[in-house]
């Protein structure tokens, strides 16, 4: 039987939490939810800061904050992080996490490869947490869905969702592939 997903107890008083791919569908909900829960959110994004600030980000920094750096470890900047992009940005994020902090990893828009050293794990006790929202037991999904229908409601991210028809699908997919997409896109077959 699959073990229940562990809880690593991230709390606002531990310090800043970074969100990469912050303007994306997962990132924008993460920014709004974490801000609502009292975290100081640093949004890492290739887009303009205004919409991320309105979601609750305390700070917005460019993707270059996670550009490849030859040093094996960097000055710690974040207590915890939500990574939606994978690849080099995730490797760079792991180098910037405070001792005992955690990084959740759910996506691969910057690439599926993760080239890192063991140093963040053995020198700072950093945790890399995998997220799979598909194969987890239904009961765990229902717990999370109930929260998003209640205390965790993210009305700003939800209100910014774009509804598109099939005729717009090609351009929406092109925007996804080029990293230009922002927020949630809903394919409405009635349009
Ligand atoms: N594991 C799971 O259960 C699970 C569940 C849902 C989604 N996912 C995965 O999570 C990832 C994010 O999903 P999403 O729906 O949020 O996608 P999305 O709406 O396309 O957002 C991804 C965001 O990442 C940033 N980005 C795009 N290309 C990039 C690049 N080359 N380098 C660095 N940043 C880049 C962009 O944000 P900025 O411009 O703000 O930087 C973009 O808006 C996807 O890989 C998706 O498949 C996994």
Image: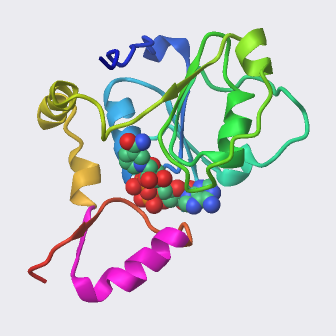
Q: Relative to 71, is 175 above or below?
A: below
- 135 with respect to 173 (left or right): left
Residue displayed at 22% across by 58% down: 159
| Residue 179, image x, y percentages | 54, 66
Disc tally is 0
Q: Residue furthest left?
A: 190
Q: Relative to 22, is 188 above or below?
A: below
- 119 with respect to 174 (left or right): right
Q: Residue furthest right?
A: 70
- One can see residue 142 in this view: yes
Q: Which residues are magenta?
A: 161-177
The stretch drawn in magenta includes residue 176: yes
| Residue 122, image x, y percentages | 75, 11
- One can see residue 24 in this view: no
Residue 135 position by quadrant: top left
Residue displayed at 59% across by 20% down: 79
| Residue 121, image x, y percentages | 71, 16
Q: Relative to 72, is 28 above or below?
A: below
């Amino acid at each position: 039987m699959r073990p229940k997903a562990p809880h690593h107890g991230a709390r606002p008083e531990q310090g800043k939490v970074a969100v990469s791919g912050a303007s994306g569908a997962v990132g924008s909900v993460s920014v709004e939810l974490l801000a609502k829960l009292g975290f100081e959110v640093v949004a890492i994004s290739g887009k303009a800061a205004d919409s991320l600030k309105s979601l609750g980000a305390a700070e917005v920094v460019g993707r270059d904050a996670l550009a490849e750096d030859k040093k094996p470890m960097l000055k710690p900047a974040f207590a915890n992080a939500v990574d939606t992009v994978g690849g080099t940005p995730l490797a760079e994020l792991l180098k910037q996490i405070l001792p005992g902090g955690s990084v959740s990893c759910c996506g691969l828009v910057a690439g599926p490869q993760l080239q890192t050293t063991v140093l963040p794990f053995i020198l700072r006790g950093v945790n890399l947490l995998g997220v799979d929202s598909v194969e987890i037991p239904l009961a765990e999904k229902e717990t999370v869905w109930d929260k998003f229908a209640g205390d965790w409601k993210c009305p700003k991210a939800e209100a910014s969702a774009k509804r598109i028809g099939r005729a717009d699908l090609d351009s929406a997919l092109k925007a996804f592939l080029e990293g230009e997409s922002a927020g949630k896109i809903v394919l409405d077959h009635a349009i």
